Amino acid sequence: MDAFREAPAGLDDQNLVGIGKALPDEVRVAIETTLKSEGFYTGEPKGYFGPDARKALAAWVDAKGPLGDPPRPQTTAEQQAAPAPGGLDADVVNRIRDKVFAQAQAAKTDKQKLAAIKQLGILARYGDLPSRWVLVRNYHQARAIRSVVTPDEITRYALDILVSKPEGVEKPEFEFIFDLTQIAQDRKSNAVGGATLQAIRDDPRLQDPLTLGAMMGQFAFAPDACDSVLAAAKKAGVDGVGSEGCDEDTRTAIIAFAKAKGGSGVEAAARKAAAEEIKTLDAQAAK
């Protein structure tokens, strides 16, 4: 239950309904049992996770307070994300990002908002973490973003944010859960598994068992996410998968598969194409 303390502000009822549907019956019963034993829930623990149980959970989180951040291990050079091939000068990326962020803030019409989102998408495909975070943070609540950014992309961006832990990003785990829940509601969860496998192949940081275990722990709170990973692993011919997409056997098998196969090329291709688009944007801005 401490996972719910990571982002108390995100515990609105609509999000809890989606998360509750994704939890196994025994987990919902365990949550209600704990809430009842600690005096927050007066009903019988039957795993229905109804309005009273959700209110009790929110009250429990409020009483316990936010969960402190775990100590962050020192990152080695090998754990850093690999730079994009033919990377652009940082000043160019910063300049375009500042311009796009200003346009997004000033946008009033749907056309202006959509134009800004498309340019944020270019920066995100290049690997710009601030742009990726804006999209991850707002994907589940902005239909316009979902019309531009695919479920595959938002999955890869969220995993990058989770493993990079950029400064200024607060509790991305819950935003990712909400995004996965929205993807499930849009009936596009099948994209999540494939994108996860691609991300693990392309990012060596995700091939660390402890790191991947922490990332996949978020999947268990979202509908269909673990099932999507398992289906994608089987489709890709991953040997030794477990009975669930998020269990240790499956994670171990996927890591071995990723190391044996090497990069998928999806991230590199996206960054290369985005770099050319950013150069075009910069040239247009200079006119």
Image (cartoon, helix red, strand yellow):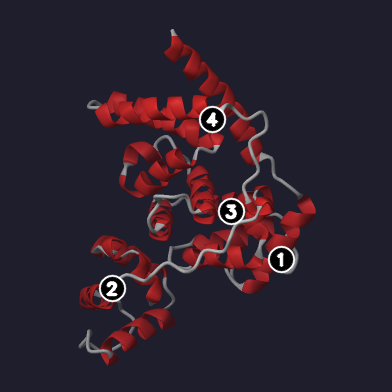
Whole-angstrom CA distance, mark 4 to mark 2, is 39 Å
Q: Secondary structure at mark 4?
A: helix
Disc 1, SS: helix
In contact (CB < 8 Å): disc 4 and disc 1: no
Q: Outermost residue, right direction?
A: 260
Q: Amino acid at mark 4?
A: Ala
The location of residue 171, given as percent across then percent down, is: 39, 59
Residue picked out by circle 1: 253
Tell which circle, 1 or 3, labels the residue nearer the N-terminal end: 3
Q: Quadrant of residue 240?
A: bottom right
- Return the disc, 4 or 1, that comes first in the chain's sequence: 4
The CA distance from mark 4 to mark 3 is: 28 Å
* Amino acid type assigned to the residue bearing label 2 in the image: Gly
Looking at the image, is 109 positioned above or below residue 1?
above
Q: Whole-Å distance between the Cαs marked 3 and 2?
A: 32 Å
Disc 4 crowd rating (10 Å Cα; few below 14, some 14-19, many 20+) is few
Look at 49% across and 50% down and name the residue there.
Answer: 161
Mark 4 or 2 closer to N-term?
2
Residue 176: percent from the left, percent from the top? Answer: 43, 55
In-front residue for pair 267/223: 267
* Amino acid under disc 1: Ala
Q: Give 190 or 140, whichever is nearer the viewer.
A: 140
Residue at coordinates 39% horizontally, 29% vertically from top-left? 98
Provide the residue designation for mark 3: 196
Would you name the residue on which mark 2 appears? 65
Quadrant where the image shows the C terminus: top left
Q: Is residue 86 visible?
A: yes
Q: Which residue is mark 4?
A: 90
State which quarter of the image contains the N terminus: bottom left
Number of on-image labels: 4
Task: Bin the neighbour count of mark 3 within 10 Å (Cα to Cα): few under 14, some 14-19, many 20 and up.
Answer: many
Point out residue 21 in the picture as x, y percentages from the top left corner. Answer: 37, 69
